[in-house]
Amino acid sequence: MPILSFSLLSNPRRLVPIMLAACVALPVWAVELVMVEQVGCEWCARWNEEIAPAYPNTPEGQFAPLRRVDLRALPEDLDIARRVSFTPTFLIVDGNRELARLEGYPGENFFWPVLAKLLVQYTGFEGDE
């Protein structure tokens, strides 16, 4: 028995409720990279210059979109393993629960491989394999 009958295919308007239900039922993404930052953080500014423009276009950025939060105003629904003390701190979260973290930013040559390793280790990210 076919999943979509011919009558559904012949009248696309009948597909709209099915398609909307499917979109509502599925999350856009579950894994995020949460950047904890604060005003005046020079390493945050450096990350913003070196990484931020490219991040959304990378495999990592597609898999774990960036969400920025202020150190002094962490969202209450963010379930972190321990207090964030340094900025920037990058939290890999799934459904608002911290899976892993990277504290500090010592440069792009360090950031990319460590982020990829954490994503592979703690999520379903497959990288450039």
Image (tube, rainbow, N blue to C red):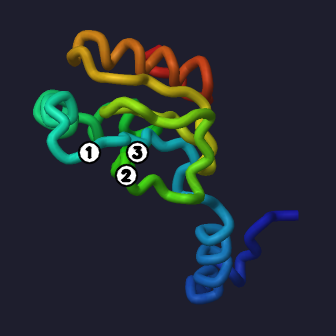
Residue 12 x/y as whole percent: 57, 83
SS type, badge 1: loop
Q: Badge 1, how many Cα within 10 Å: few under 14, some, many 20+?
A: some
As shown in the figure, which amino acid type bears the numbered disc 1?
A: Gln
Q: Is residue 96 something one can see in this rendering?
A: yes
Residue receiving disc 2? 72
Q: Is residue 59 something one can see in this rendering?
A: no
Residue 16 x/y as whole percent: 59, 82
Quick one: quadrant of the N terminus? bottom right
As shown in the figure, which amino acid type bears the numbered disc 3?
A: Pro
Residue receiving disc 1? 38
Image quadrant where residue 46 sits: top left
Alpha carbon of mark 1 to alpha carbon of mark 3: how far?
Answer: 19 Å
Which-is-in-front pick, marks 1 and 3?
1
Which-is-in-front pick, marks 3 and 2?
2
Along the line of sight, the residue nearer the viewer: 83 or 16: 83
Q: Taking 107 as reference, is 70 above or below it? A: below
Which residue is located at x 21 percent, y 34 percent? Answer: 44
Count of marks placed on residues:
3
SS type, badge 3: loop
Residue 104 in the figure: left or right of residue 85: left
Of callouts 3 and 2, the N-terminal one: 3
Alpha carbon of mark 3 to alpha carbon of mark 2: how far?
Answer: 22 Å
Residue receiving disc 3? 65
Image quadrant where residue 9 sits: bottom right
| Dots 1, 2 in contact, CB < 8 A | yes
SS type, badge 2: helix
The residue furthest right is 1
Of callouts 1 and 3, the N-terminal one: 1
Residue 87 x/y as whole percent: 31, 33
Along the line of sight, the residue nearer the viewer: 54 or 126: 54
Of callouts 1 and 2, the N-terminal one: 1
